[in-house]
Amino acid sequence: MELQSPLLREDTPRKVVRFYLLDHTTPIGKAIDIALLSLNLLFILVFVVETYPHTAATDALLWRLEVGIAGVFLVEYVLRLYGAEDRFEELTNPHTVIDLLSVLPTLSVLLLPGPVTFELGFLRVARIVRVLRFYRFTQDEKFFFGTVEAQTLRAGELVLTIFVLLFATAGIFYSAEHVVNPGVRTFGDAFYYTVVSLTTVGFGDITPVTTGGRWVTVSAILAGILLIPWQAGRIVREWTSRDRVDATCPNCGLNHHDADASHCKACGHVIYQEYDDSS
């Protein structure tokens, strides 16, 4: 259903909030989309930069950025629940769950007492799930202001799946290995290992030394084997059936035939009735 601008009629604040969080066409809606996309990229970049050596001043700056962006995402999370038509459905929406999980580690470090914060600090790596938020941006081609076709967006989802798999695996592998593995000192080291492992090159210059690191590697390889061919196959099916009609052969049951086909390409049975010119 197409959204109506709340400026064209009197609406409650809840409807106005829902409109602008879903809108991709008005100037305000576009500004919100661009701001959230930019903050999402910055939030992930902060995580990556934190894994590299830097000064205390830089560390303080990164922490302030992390807290500030997490605060914005928390406000967005609350507003989405507030504006949703069905709040339980919105609460259990996978994208909304990801939004909450990505900020909880930062909030736990910020709000919990010192000793507990020290014990839970490693959970900040859970911010890596924020990379899954990019899937929210691919649900509607209007998010890109109508400049992206649906087929192109589907192909973009495949590229995004590969990136998410590599990035998330690298983040989790880094968390499991960087303390004890001399070959994994930064996120870049973990990302390099992930790419080499998932492409089955396996140079052997970096190897997991923890049980967690080994299981992360096994899980990522299995996920790559299952997810990427499945999604690629779905895209190919969509592209190849784009110019076909939903017609089922009554003889062999084959579906989706070319629009100009008169016979089934599998068994040769007539699938389209000829026009009756006498009528």
Image (cartoon, rainbow, N blue to C red):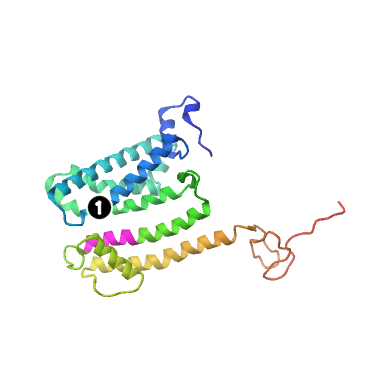
Left-right relation of 163 to 279 = left
* Most common SS among magenta residues: helix
Count of marks overlaid on the render: 1
Taking the spot 48% from the left edge, 55% from the top edge, the residue there is: 154
Relative to the observer, which residue lies in front, 8 or 98?
A: 8
Q: Which residues are magenta?
A: 166-176
**Residue assigned mark 1:** 47
* 37 shown above or below 125: above
Relative to the observer, which residue lies in front, 35 or 242?
A: 35
Residue 205, image quadrant: bottom left
Residue 226, image quadrant: bottom left
Pointer 1: residues within 10 angstroms few (<14), some, or many (20+)?
Answer: many
Residue 134 percent coordinates (x, y): 38, 50
- Amino acid type, callout 1: Phe
* 57 shown above or below 248: above
Does the segment drawn in magenta span residue 214? no
